[in-house]
Image (cartoon, helix red, strand yellow):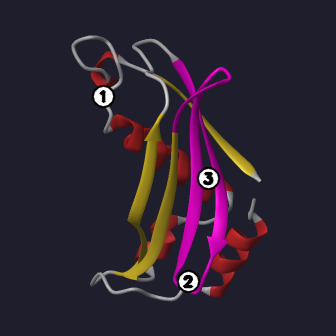
């Protein structure tokens, strides 16, 4: 399943030339992942109250085209492999149909001390159900 998060590029997202600063694509991707997880029925506040959080372990990013001030962007998120304590999420950021950014994110489930923790069965099932 593809989860979609729409956003507009604001002045604060750009450099002096009006082009999106490269690190902001990671922020846009984070928003897309957060919305995707929420849309899957996973409440990250409840996870934290239970002593668990998600953390990005690694990212492979490709910058294809520049986005600019005022652009409307679409962040697409797809869940990939789900294992005992982690998952992969593939993301694309598009301006209409032009690919601007793509990234593969490995996300770990961790306890509040920073140690890897198994995904709870109900969360794992929701992630597997959304596998795309």
Mark 1: give few (<14), some (14-19) or many (20+) Cα within 10 Å. some
Relative to 38, does residue 109 appear above or below in the rendering?
Answer: below
Image side of residue 47 versus residue 15, left or right: right
Residue denoted by label 3 = 36
Identify the image quadrant of the C terminus: bottom right
Q: Residue at x 29, y 81 (%)?
A: 114
Q: Quadrant of residue 14?
A: top left
Magenta span includes 87? yes
Residue 102 horizontal/vertical position (percent) = 53, 42
Name the N-terminal-most of marks 2 and 3. Answer: 3
Give the SS element for disc 3.
helix
Residue 88 is labelled as none
State the CA–CA distance, disc 3 to disc 1: 24 Å
The reply to whether the C-beta atoms of the residues labelled 3 and 1 are less than 8 Å apart is no
Secondary structure mostly taken by the magenta-highlighted segment of the chain = strand
Q: Which residues are magenta?
A: 72-101
Give the CA distance from mark 1 to mark 2: 34 Å
The residue labelled by disc 2 is: 119
Query: Which residue does the numbered mark 1 point to in the structure image?
Result: 21
């Amino acid at each position: 399943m593809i989860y979609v998060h729409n956003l507009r590029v604001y002045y604060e997202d750009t450099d002096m030339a009006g082009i999106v600063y490269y690190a902001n694509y990671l922020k846009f991707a984070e928003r897309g992942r957060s919305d995707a997880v929420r849309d899957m029925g996973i409440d990250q506040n409840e996870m934290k109250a239970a002593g668990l959080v998600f953390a990005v372990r690694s990212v492979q990013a490709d910058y294809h085209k520049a986005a600019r001030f005022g652009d409307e962007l679409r962040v697409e998120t797809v869940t990939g492999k789900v294992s005992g304590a982690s998952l992969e999420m593939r993301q694309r950021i598009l301006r209409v149909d032009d690919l601007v950014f793509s990234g593969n994110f490995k996300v770990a489930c961790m306890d509040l001390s920073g140690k890897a923790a198994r995904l709870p069965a109900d969360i794992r099932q929701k992630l597997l159900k959304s596998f795309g």
